[in-house]
């Protein structure tokens, strides 16, 4: 079974949802990555583009991990199935059964949210394979996820 939900996280101009909306109630201790060089913000720097086509990395930040999924859902799944979509202001990342909304500079905008609770599934329902899309014409985020009834 899959579901499609329109999450109105932005208004017609692409601005953030009401400033009174607070999704940041979940506390997460993020692991640090070892190795590589660090930038001024302490994150590893991405290597220069090997293609030589003139494109450059605009922003680099740590995304979701299995630790985030465990902290939100009490379990984690491997390998990570990832969905990523971007609009003018935000980056929506989905990994297995958790998602987060980031500002384009990498700061967390919404906190971590369980896919099960977002899609109205019970905590025992197995969810995986998230996909997302931001439609610029409608200024809407679309998200799909696979659900498997644990009784079958």
Image (cartoon, grey):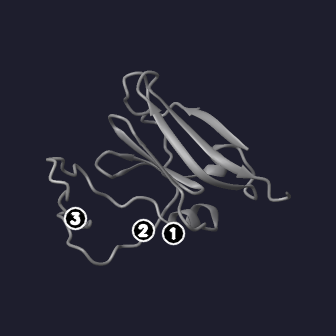
Q: Is residue 84 left or right of residue 4?
A: left
According to the picture, the residue beneath numbered tag 3 turns out to be: 45
The residue under the point 31% across, 45% down is 104
Placement of 139 over or under 130, stated as above or below:
above
The residue under the point 51% across, 46% down is 23
Asked if one can make out residue 27 in the rendered structure from this viewpoint, the answer is yes
- Are circles 1 and 2 on residues that touch, CB within 8 Å? yes
- Are circles 1 and 3 on residues that touch, CB within 8 Å? no
Q: Residues within 10 Å of mark 2 (few under 14, many from 20)?
A: few
Which label number is shown at residue 30? 2
Placement of 51 over or under 145, stated as above or below:
below
Q: Secondary structure at mark 1?
A: helix
Q: Secondary structure at mark 2?
A: loop
Name the quadrant containing residue 47: bottom left
Q: Residue 113 appears at what percent x and percent y? A: 56, 51
Q: Is residue 16 left or right of residue 131?
A: left
Placement of 81 over or under 54, stated as above or below:
below
Between disc 1 and disc 3, whose residue precedes?
3
According to the picture, the residue beneath numbered tag 1 turns out to be: 67
Placement of 47 over or under 142, stated as above or below:
below
């Amino acid at each position: 079974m899959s579901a499609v939900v329109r999450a109105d996280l932005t208004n017609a101009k692409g601005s953030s949802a009401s400033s009174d909306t607070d999704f940041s109630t979940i506390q997460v201790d993020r692991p640090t990555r070892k190795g590589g060089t660090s930038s001024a913000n302490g994150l590893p720097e991405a290597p220069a583009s090997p293609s030589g086509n003139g494109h450059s990395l605009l922003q680099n930040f740590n995304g979701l991990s299995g630790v985030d999924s465990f902290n939100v859902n009490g379990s984690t799944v491997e390998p990570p199935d990832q969905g990523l979509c971007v609009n003018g202001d935000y980056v929506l990342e989905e990994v297995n059964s958790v998602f987060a909304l980031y500002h384009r500079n990498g700061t967390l905008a919404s906190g971590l949210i369980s896919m099960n609770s977002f899609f109205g599934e019970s905590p025992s329902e197995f969810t995986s394979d998230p996909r997302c899309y931001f439609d610029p014409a409608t200024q809407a985020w679309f998200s799909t996820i696979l659900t498997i009834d644990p009784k079958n």
